[in-house]
Image: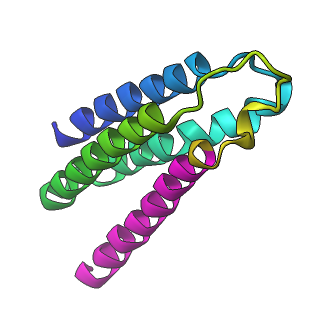
Amino acid sequence: MGDQATRVVCAFAAITSLIIVCARSPGLQGIDLPFLALVVAPFLLLGLMAGSVRERSSDARVLFILTLFLALGGTFLLALHAPIPNTGPEPGLAQSVVMIGVPLLQLIAVILLGLILRLRRMLAS
């Protein structure tokens, strides 16, 4: 059950983050696709990790709590600091430091979490 809840939170957070990024962008270009993949990547990795901790309930609970924290915090920061579209020349979506920094920090946190869970699994075996 914990893995399904984690996947639901991941899907909701990924969709919400994409909506925020797309709504605050005056126009998406083809060059913005890698950035949009960066926005979704932490939640995809968390969803994959949820399937791997299915049989360990303590790891599943920790993963769910951290997923909820990352999803709420990241979505809040994206919504709070997203640049408002201007009518001037389009500099590209990936010019904002916060728009790149938040997903990048989320991705780093997810990678560290995955390494910690893997280490715990190896030590328990």
Quadrant of the rendering where the C terminus is positioned: bottom left
Q: Is residue 11 left or right of residue 23?
A: left
Q: Which colour scheme is used?
A: rainbow
Is residue 70 part of the magenta span, yes or no?
no
Quick one: 64 or 125, which is closer to the camera?
64
Looking at the picture, does residue 18 appear above or below residue 63?
Answer: above
Quick one: 34 or 91, which is closer to the camera?
91
Displayed quadrant of residue 23: top right
In the rendered image, the residue lying farthest to the bottom is 123
Q: Residue at x 53, y 47 (%)?
A: 103
Q: Which residue is drawn at 23% across and 80% down?
A: 124
What type of secondary structure mainly makes up the magenta span? helix
Q: In this view, does 92 lie to the left or right of 110?
A: right
Image mark count: 0
Quadrant of the rendering where the N terminus is positioned: top left
Magenta stretch bounds? 100-125
Looking at the picture, does residue 20 appear above or below residue 99?
Answer: above
Is residue 111 part of the magenta span, yes or no?
yes
